[in-house]
Structures are given as C-alpha cells and as structure tokens.
Image: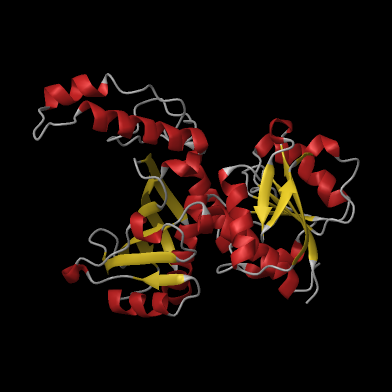
Amino acid sequence: MQGYRVAVVGVTGEVGKTFLKVLQERNFPVKELIPIASSRSRGKKVTFRGQEYTVKALEDFDNFKGIDIALFSAGGSTSKEWAPKFAQDGAVVVDNSSAWRMEKDVPLVVPEVNPEDVKWHKGIIANPNCSTIQMVVALKPIYDRAGIKNVVVSTYQAVSGAGAKAIADLLRQTLAFAKLIEGKEDISPEELKEIFEKLPPAQKFPHQIAFNALPHIDRFFEDGYTREENKMLYETRKIMHDESINVSATCVRVPVFYGHSESISIQTEKEITPQEAREVLRNAKGVVVVDNPSDNEYPLPVDVAGRDEVFVGRIREDRVFKPGLNMWVVADNIRKGAATNAVQIAELLIEYKLI
C-alpha cells in the first residue's frame, strides 16, 4: 500500500490529538507524520503508532513541499494564513476551522452526504461545523426519500466543542460543587444559590456552566441569532446543494463533556412515516438507529463518546409540520464532528485518486 506524508497542524489541541487516534484506528496509510503546532508547543512530544515525535512550529518551515495531506485544527486566523501556503506547495489541506467553509471555490464535505464534492477542490477542503455534520448525516436519507422544506433544531452542545479551557471550567466547577455539598442529603434553592456563588469563575464562558444551560454559542447578530446558529443554516444548504432549505437553530451549551445532542423537527416535501424513516436511516451509511423508548433505549451522549457514527432515535411524526418528522440525534463532536470527518475526507482523496 502506498504511504503518504501527513501533517497535523494543531496537533497538541483536543482535535489534533484525536486526529492521531483516528489515523491510527482507521489504519490510514501514513508514511511519515509531521506534527505541527504553535510556537508555544514547539518541542513537545506526541506519540503515533508507538513512535515518539517532536512537535515543530509552523514558523520552523521554509516550505511545505513533499507533504501530501495537511489536517488543520489550529483556528481560523492560523488557517487563513497558513493553509494557502501548504496548498501552494502541493498539499491538500483539510481544515477544521470556519475560515474556508463558505468560500465558493472550497468544497464543504461530509463524506456520507456529498463525497463527490472533494473532486473539485483547489487545494483546500473545509470540514463543516460539528453540529452541522451530525445533523446532515441524519437528514440526508430523509431528504433523498421525501425531500425537506424546513428544519427547526435545538442543540445541546458539549463543552469540549469550546476547547480545553471549557472542559476545565466544567471540571473545576463540578469538583468544587461536590466538595461544598459533601455530607448533605438535601439542599434548598437558597442554599444552591449560595453554593453557586462560591464556584470558581468560568474562564471560557460568560456564566457558570456546571448545572446550567447557556443559550449562547459564538457571537450574536442583530436579528438575535448567533454565528453558530447561522452556520447550521448556510452550511446545510451548501452541503446539501439546496438553497431552498430553511434551518432555524437554537444552540445551547450544556454541562456535558463529550457528545452533542440535537432535537430536530423536519417539514418534508412528501409524506414519510416514522417506520419508513427508521428503515431508510438504518440503511444509511454512518447512522445507527437506537429507537426503542418503551425500553428506555435512545441515543445518549454518555454512550456515543468515542464513537464515529451518528446515532438517531425518538423518531416520530411531528405535530406541527405536516408532513413532517421529529427525531433526536447524538454524536461525538470531537470525532465525527471534527477529527473523524476530516480523516474520512482524506480517505476520499485516496479513493478518488486525487493525491
């Protein structure tokens, strides 16, 4: 099997470390790994397939010739500056930031939905937003069977989607809370308020995240929607190649470490029963149906952490949209929502003989 020189940019971050795991688990044909991060991480060590590597900084390179694939998860500004340099030197960049997603000449790809789009890349391919990825994987089989007019989605997003500081916020606040209530078997709302005021202040979020829900992900616009919510609209249209689909999203950060959950109401073009929907979803690539509520079986974030599939349950007729469906969709936001999707894109490049 032919091997490839693969650069991982942002290798010391949460997604970067998961890139290494996924590359190894999926037996991706890496001939040589080039681990890259910011100058702050220069000299750190990472391990891949039992071998230790020393991390280099982007500034350490005169050029990037000879690199076949560059997996980026280093933030939008870094990607805007450095991804074109990799592409100019012959690498194909798969970028996990929002920097390139809505550029007309950059494919935005979810392999289960629009794999053919990788064929028209010009050196850079964008990885969609984590919440968009899991939603469109679940929507595509329904779209192909019955068409889709409108989607109303509420997301319940894990703190890991906001990075290491966000994980630390939840962990520190939860541990502090446990210590403050030690020995108590009952607690009043008044006591809770006093305890919450003693928790460590959030470093990442504008409010306490432990035991809370924040309807605020990314910045707000004048119409009241956030940037995250707009991503779910415009990215869905681009991935599905359908500008007529409307998506109204409310994105909420919840005190979960890994795994985004979504409640999705869908107005379809044609009638489709819940049973038909279960059947098309069971036959869809990358989807696992867990839908037996009478036995308390439905997708849960604690069950999907570490998995690459998109899990769908609570499939039922929508009471507002006619015809329509309602379903519950859960996936690991760091894997399928980021690292795994990017590696799958790299696999498509090999499959289609584009590298």
Which residue: 19% across, 22% down? 193
Q: Is residue 92 above or below residue 220?
A: below
Q: Looking at the image, which is closer to me, 214 or 140?
A: 214
Indicate whether 163 appears above or below 64. Answer: above
Left or right? Give the position of 348 relative to 305: right
Image location (x, y in percent) of residue 155: 38, 48
- The reply, left or right, for residue 171 in relation to residue 41 is left
Does the image show residue 238? no
Residue 165 shown left or right of residue 156 in the figure: right
Residue 143 in percent (x, y) is at: 46, 69
Say whether residue 68 is visible: yes
Q: Is residue 121 above or below residue 8?
A: below
Colour mapping: secondary structure
Q: Nearer the viewer, residue 296 or 143?
A: 296
The part of the image, by quadrant, that contains residue 251 is top left
Q: Residue at x 35, y 33 (%)?
A: 209
| Residue 311, x across and y down, in percent | 39, 65
Residue located 62% across and 48% down the image = 16
| 175 horizontally vs 166: left or right | left
Location of the C terminus (image quadrant): bottom right
x, y percentage for residue 175?
A: 32, 33
Quarter of the image where one finds residue 270: bottom left
The N terminus: image quadrant? bottom right
Determine the image quadrant of residue 282. bottom left
Residue in the image at 44% along x and 38% along y: 167
Tag count: 0
Q: Nearer the viewer, residue 269 or 133?
A: 133
